[in-house]
């Protein structure tokens, strides 16, 4: 019974993450902009969800939000090297997933984007000053993180 509850929360957490990241990925790839209004609405819904259904996770959510605020500060200090839309999206992820899960997804996303950016630079397809959309790497990282968590939790049967 406990394993089923854990699996249900895991699936709900990642479905929410995908509902946020998929439309933002499409928009980021097409326009290089992240719909901040969408991330704001998602954040409000995430807060409401946590207040109503997961009060045991509130501390984790607060620290996840603080991590998002850190990235907003980084966006301002770096004068947009990390886009403000990306930073607000990270804030939304922090509110929805809490510190630990959102940190894992963000860390993997930075690694994946760095590897991809390095490869693109090596094959001379882009110049160093050009930017890459970051949200697709957040989505890919979330998919990988979900698959790993499902496999580690024994929720995916081998073969």
Image: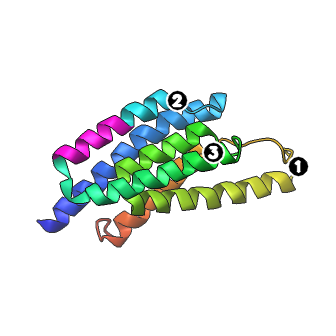
Q: How many residues crowd mark 2 within 10 Å: few (<14), some (14–19), many (20+)?
A: some
The answer for how far apart the CA atoms under marks 3 and 2 are is 16 Å
The answer for how far apart the CA atoms under marks 1 and 2 are is 30 Å
Where in the figure is residue 29, as x and y percent of width and height? 63, 35
Question: Which residue bears the numbered disc 3?
Answer: 75
Taking the spot 20% from the left edge, 59% from the top edge, the residue there is 56
Would residue 44 be counted in the magenta stretch?
yes
Labels 3, 2: front one: 3
Where in the figure is residue 99, as x and y percent of width and height? 40, 60
Q: Taking 96 as reference, is 130 left or right?
A: right
Which mark is on residue 124?
A: 1
Start-end of magenta stretch:
43-52
Labels 1, 3: front one: 3
Labels 3 and 2 touching (C-beta < 8 A): no
Which mark is on residue 35?
A: 2
Taking the spot 62% from the left edge, 57% from the top edge, the residue there is 110
Q: Is residue 88 above or below residue 150?
A: above
| Residue 14 seen in render | no
Where in the figure is residue 107, as x and y percent of width and height? 55, 61
Q: Quadrant of residue 134?
A: top right
Which badge, 3 or 2, is on the more N-terminal residue?
A: 2
Q: Quadrant of residue 15?
A: top left
């Amino acid at each position: 019974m406990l394993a089923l509850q854990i699996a249900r929360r895991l699936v709900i957490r990642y479905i929410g993450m995908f509902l946020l990241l998929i439309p933002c990925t499409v928009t980021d790839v097409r326009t290089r902009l992240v719909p901040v209004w969408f991330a704001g609405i998602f954040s409000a819904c995430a807060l409401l969800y946590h207040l109503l259904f997961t009060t045991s996770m509130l501390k984790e959510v607060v620290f996840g939000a603080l991590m998002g605020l850190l990235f907003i500060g980084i966006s301002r200090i770096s004068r947009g090297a990390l886009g403000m839309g990306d930073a607000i999206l990270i804030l939304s992820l922090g509110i929805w997933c809490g510190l630990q899960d959102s940190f894992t997804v963000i860390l993997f996303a930075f690694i994946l984007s760095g590897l991809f950016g390095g490869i693109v630079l090596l094959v001379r397809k882009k110049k160093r000053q050009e930017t890459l959309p970051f949200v697709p790497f957040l989505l890919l990282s979330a998919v990988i993180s979900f698959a790993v968590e499902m496999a580690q939790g024994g929720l995916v049967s081998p073969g």
